[in-house]
C-alpha cells in the first residue's frame, strides 16, 4: 500500500510539468502527506484537465458519514473493477484522476518485532514530479459536498527496487502521454487499466528516510524528512 508521500515542488514547477494551472500554494512543498488531508490532483470532469484539492481517502457517493474513508486511501488494481466503491468510477475518464507527487514512502519490516520500522523514500526519474493513477468522486455527507480520492496500487514483484521493501507499490503514471490517456473519457475500464502496472525498476530509486515521517505533523515538515539522520 501507499500511505504517505511527498509533493515538494512549487506551483511553477508543477505548471511546467503538467501543463495545467494550479490553484495556489496549498498542497505544494509537502514532505509528509498523510491520509484524510487535502491533496493536489488533476481531474477532467468536463473534458478539460484542471487541478483541484481533494480529500485523500475516498468516500463513496452513497456514504452516510466519513467513517471508513481512511481505509479507502488505496484501490487495488486487481479488484478495482469489482469493489462497489470503485467499479463505477474506473470506466469514466471524468472520475479518473492524477494524484500529484514527487516521491512516496514505504516501510521495511524490522527483523525484530520490537524494533522501529525504517521508512524508505522512493523517487521517480531522480525526483521529478509524477502522478499516481487515482479515482475520485463527489459525495454529499451531512448536507456538505465532499470531493475525495484514492490512488491505485499494484503488485511490486516486477520492480525489484520496490519489492525489496514492500510487496505493493502505487501505480505511477510518469509520462505525459499516459497521464493524458488516463483522463480520456473515450477509454473504457479495460483500456484505462492497460496503462497501469508496476513502474520499470530502472526509473525508481529508494533511500532511507527520516523515521520522523512515522508521525506526520503538518507544522514540522521540511527536507530533513527525506533523509535518514547521520
Image (tube, helix red, strand yellow):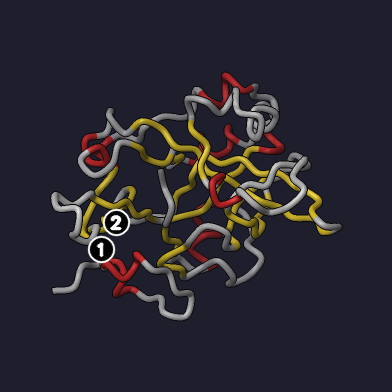
- Vertical placement of residue 65 versus 211, above or below: above
Would you name the residue on which mark 2 appears?
Answer: 121
Toward which corner of the image does residue 153 lie, by quadrant? top left
- The residue lying at 48 percent from left, 63 percent from top is 13
In the displayed structure, does residue 16 sit left or right of residue 141?
left
Position of residue 203 measured from the top left corner of the image (x, y, whole percent): 29, 42
In front of the other: 167 or 134 = 167
- The residue lying at 37 percent from left, 76 percent from top is 222
Crowding at mark 2 (Cα within 10 Å: few <14, some 14-19, many 20+):
many
Instruction: Find the residue positioned furthest to the top.
Output: 190
Would you name the residue on which mark 1 appears?
Answer: 209
In the rendered picture of this protein, how many numbered marks are placed on residues? 2
Q: Which mark is residue 92?
A: none
Where disc 2 sits, the SS reads: strand
First-in-chain label (2 vs 1):
2
Q: Quadrant of the N terminus?
A: top left
Amino acid at each position: 500500500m501507499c500511505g504517505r508521500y511527498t509533493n515538494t515542488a512549487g506551483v511553477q514547477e508543477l505548471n511546467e510539468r503538467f501543463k495545467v494551472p494550479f490553484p495556489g500554494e496549498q498542497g505544494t512543498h509537502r514532505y509528509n502527506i498523510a491520509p484524510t488531508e487535502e491533496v493536489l490532483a488533476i481531474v477532467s470532469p468536463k473534458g478539460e484537465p484542471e487541478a483541484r484539492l481533494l480529500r485523500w481517502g475516498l468516500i463513496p457517493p452513497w456514504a452516510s458519514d466519513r467513517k471508513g474513508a481512511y481505509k479507502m486511501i488505496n484501490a487495488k488494481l486487481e479488484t478495482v473493477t469489482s469493489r462497489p466503491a470503485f467499479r463505477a468510477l474506473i470506466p469514466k475518464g471524468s472520475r479518473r484522476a492524477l494524484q500529484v507527487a514527487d516521491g512516496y514512502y514505504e516501510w521495511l519490516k524490522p527483523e525484530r518485532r520490537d524494533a522501529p520500522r525504517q521508512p524508505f523514500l522512493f523517487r521517480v526519474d531522480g525526483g521529478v514530479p509524477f502522478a499516481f493513477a487515482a479515482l475520485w468522486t463527489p459525495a454529499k455527507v451531512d448536507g456538505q459536498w465532499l470531493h475525495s480520492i484514492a490512488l491505485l496500487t499494484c503488485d511490486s514483484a516486477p520492480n525489484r527496487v520496490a519489492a525489496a521493501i514492500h510487496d505493493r507499490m502505487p501505480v505511477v503514471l510518469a509520462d505525459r502521454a499516459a497521464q493524458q490517456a488516463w483522463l480520456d473519457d473515450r477509454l473504457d475500464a479495460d483500456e484505462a487499466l492497460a496503462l497501469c502496472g508496476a513502474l520499470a525498476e530502472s526509473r525508481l530509486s529508494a533511500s532511507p528516510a527520516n523515521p520522523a515521517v512515522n508521525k506526520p505533523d503538518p507544522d514540522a515538515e521540511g527536507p530533513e524528512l527525506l533523509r535518514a539522520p547521520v
